[in-house]
Amino acid sequence: MPTRKVRITLTNKIVASYEARSYPRDYQTDANWIELYKVPVYKIIVEGTDNSGTDKTIIHQAPRFMPYWNDPKALDPAYATKGWANSGLSSARTIIVSRYIRDYEVHNRYTPGKGAIVLKGSFYIHAGPGILDDVGFGSAGCVEIVGNYDTFKFDIASLAGATSPADSDNTIQNLVSERHLTVVIEAATAPDIKSLFSRKVSRQSIFGP
């Protein structure tokens, strides 16, 4: 049975803030402390129709721009850009999603949510902090959904026709294969993240003993 079309909109409406750390390297002057930056969190909209044919809109939130630091003296070879950057997609565009990585796992912090919707290159939509107070997630400009990522996935899948969260990955994969998943990115000005330095926290407070 074909999936129903679903649209995700990354809006330019700021709804909160989040204290993120730089990625793929921590920007720090002391090995025991990590610097945090207060980045804006944006409204994310998931739209489609439910099983009764009624239009439905579901709201989520996520940072769109994150602090990126790839230390020229200790480069992470997985990333081409050297030094500091305000990383994220800022220009307006509409993307027909062509790839879903169902087994993707977040690298910078532990989260049980798996799966990534590929926007462009290495810019993904994937799991983020469970709550805004869980500080210290980082990304190279990916959109990290705040909250339960499995709920986010089922919100997408249910609008496509799924009736069980267990079917979320298969349904999203089918959405992508059928070119029925669209992401609209609203234009937004990337903030000067380096000027948004918030505070330093111990590595132990982020990663534990």
Image (cartoon, grey):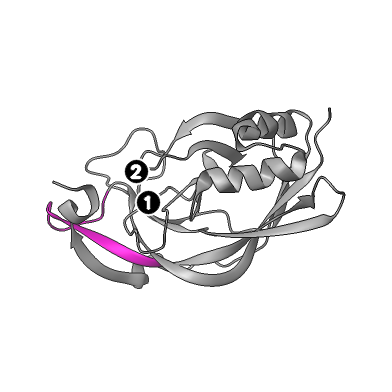
User: Residue 96: horizontal and vertical position, in percent?
Assistant: 74, 41
Label 1 vs 2, first from the N-terminus = 2
Three-letter code, disc 1: Gly
Name the residue beneath numbered marker 2.
Answer: 108
Q: Decide whether residue 34 is among the magenta residues.
A: yes
User: Residue 172: horizontal and vertical position, in percent?
Assistant: 67, 35
Residue 145 or residue 97, whichever sits in front: 145
In the rendered image, the residue lying farthest to the right is 53
Identify the residue shown where x is 41% and y is 53%.
129
Residue at disc 1, secondary structure: loop
Q: Decide whether residue 85 is among the magenta residues.
A: no
Name the residue beneath numbered marker 1.
Answer: 138
Disc 1/disc 2 C-alpha distance (Å) = 6 Å
Identify the residue shown where x is 48% and y is 59%.
65
Q: Callout 1 environment at 10 Å: few (<14), some (14 to 19), or many (20+)? A: many
Tags 1 and 2 in contact by the CB under 8 Å rule?
yes
